[in-house]
Amino acid sequence: MTTVPPAAVVEPAPRRPRWLPLVATVAFVVLCIAAGNWQRARMHEKEALRVALDAASRAPAVELPRGVVDWRPWRYRRVVVHGRYQPERQFLLDNRVHDGRVGYDVVTPLAQDDGTRVLVDRGFVPAGRDRAVLPDAPAPAGAVTVEGRIELPPRGYVFGNPPPSGPLWAHLDIDRYAATIDAGVLPIVLQATGGVTDPALARDWPAPDLGSEKHLGYMVQWYTFAAMAAGFWMYFAVRHRLRRTR
């Protein structure tokens, strides 16, 4: 007599908790809304900075102040400075573009009567056909008065590279430049707009691009992600409920 083995008992697979998709969706929506709110705050900060910079550029030119610790409120303010150019310390900033032409910005230190130096960006000069031959842009001799707007160059941009030793610099780093001379250098660059002009140098400085439109795009993107996640959860939740009622 043959015995039939009992049928194997199949245990049901563990079911996923019903609350897990809801919790994951809520967490994702909260994260996206927080990111969107941060981008919106940054956008408002950039817009406020734009208003401040526009007001600074419209303000009348004043004498360059002495003893300033924080130059950020002075960014794009128009100032007047007096002194003598030091052409032996002049250098060129490489890879500049103006009206579709590649060239250099001519930067010359201006020694004030108290011994401090101000780096003056005297303007743009186009490059020649031979990159090995640098353009000649002699600075005016004697005492000069220069009017311009204050710009704050980035700090710590060179990532440990040795300081340039020649007249051609890839970028401007005030600390590195100060290490090459035996005198104090103010942590600003004066973009010249008035004073003794050189017809070979272009001085129509562009308005700063603060990137507020970029933050607007990111804000819309994060809010869209939040709305899509909430919409997908509602769609699948309603479809699941309808299937259970049939």
Image: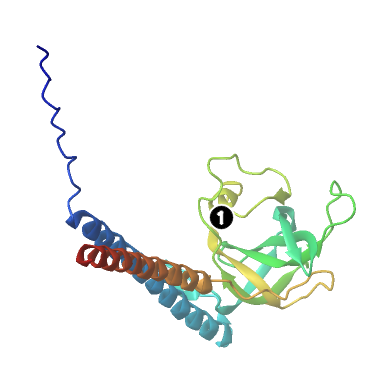
Residue 96 appears in the figure: yes
In the rendered image, the vertical position of residue 209 relative to residue 244, given as above or below: below
Q: Quadrant of residue 234?
A: bottom left
Question: In the displayed structure, would residue 181 be above or below residue 228?
Answer: above
Q: Nearer the viewer, residue 245 or 98?
A: 245
Q: Quadrant of residue 80?
A: bottom right
**Residue furthest out toward the top:** 1
Report the residue marked by disc 1.
174
Comparing 165 with 241, the one in front is 241
In-image side of 42 versus 103 (left or right): left
- Name the residue located 57 percent from the left edge and 53 percent from the top edge: 173
Give the residue displayed 61% in from the left and 55% down from the top.
172
* Neighbour tally class for label 1: few under 14, some 14-19, many 20 plus, Cα within 10 Å: many
How many numbered discs sit on the rendered protein? 1
Q: Position of residue 211 (x, y in %)?
A: 53, 70
Indicate the quadrant where residue 69 lies: bottom left
Q: Does residue 105 show up? A: no
**Residue 142: x %, y % from top left:** 75, 68
Residue at the image position 18 percent from the left and 57 percent from the top: 19
Q: Residue furthest right?
A: 129
Q: Secondary structure at mark 1?
A: helix
Type of amino acid under label 1: Ile
Q: Position of residue 95 (x, y in %)?
A: 73, 55
Q: Quadrant of the N terminus?
A: top left
Residue at the extreme front of the image, as rendered? 1
